[in-house]
Image (cartoon, helix red, strand yellow):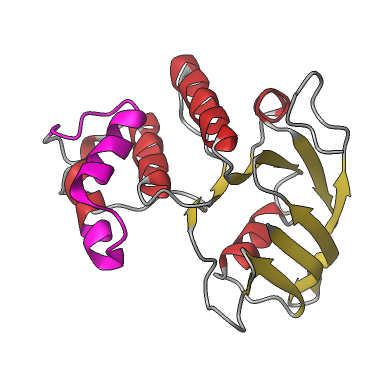
Amino acid sequence: MIEVSELSKKYGSRKVLQGVSAVFNKGHIYGLVGVNGSGKTTLMRCICGFTRPDSGTVTVLGKRIGKEVDFAPSTGFIIETPGFLPHYSGLRNLMILAAISRRAAPEAVKGAIRQLGLDPHDKKPVGQYSLGMRQRLGLAQAIMEDPDVLILDEPFNGLDAEGNEDIHALLGTLRDKGKIILLASHSAYDIRKGCDTIYEVKEGKLTRRAATQGNDHEEP
């Protein structure tokens, strides 16, 4: 479970988050919608532990961020554009990250790359990847440690129609395994199609919208 309580954040005089509270449960996909600058990414960064709120609390899987742990435990993420070493292959990039965290075996890394429709043995440097390929690699990085939580900011960015459907199918499978998935997208179609519960972020406040129609995973 992720618990956000009375979260507030200002940059200068601008109130980006104002008393935001929400609970995100296992086995659900949550969507955040809102215009650029509405606070979606800031909320995600606070949950991950990358940004400290001015007030309020974030608890992820029973651990309070900034008090008990610095960063959200067992959490995979894409926040803004995934960054990789451009002269190395996709596999080598992820293997470097896996060596640092020590939480993903080589076969798990290769398996994640395959799940995202990429070839782990492709020697092409990431600098020659298309935007869609880079996005797939970023998603592979997010899932390679089999985290309990996924925080995904614009995960469909740069994907073609086939890639879009592939990611929706993957997220549905991960949701059915009990993952907590929180995603933001500028696409109303992607939010309606993929999310069980939708929140609008507007002027720093969070409002729950009606859940998607006909979804067996809708929360009460």
Q: Residue 64 at x, y = what percent?
A: 65, 75
Q: Residue 74 at x, y = what percent?
A: 48, 60
Image quadrant in which the C terminus is located: top right
Q: Would residue 92 be seen by someone viewing this image from the given angle? A: yes
Q: Residue at x 60, y 80 (%)?
A: 66
Q: Residue 55 at x, y = what percent?
A: 78, 79
Residue 104 left/right relative to 5: left
Q: Residue 122 at x, y = what percent?
A: 14, 32
Q: Residue at x 70, y 41 (%)?
A: 30
Residue 97 sits inside the magenta stretch: yes
* Residue 209 location, quadrant: top right
Magenta-tinted stretch = 96-122
Residue 9 sits inside the magenta stretch: no
Q: Residue at x 29, y 54 (%)?
A: 104
Q: How many marks?
A: 0
Image quadrant in which the N terminus is located: bottom right
Compared with residue 1, is residue 169 higher up or lower down, i.e. above or below?
above
Q: Would residue 38 be seen by someone viewing this image from the given angle? A: no
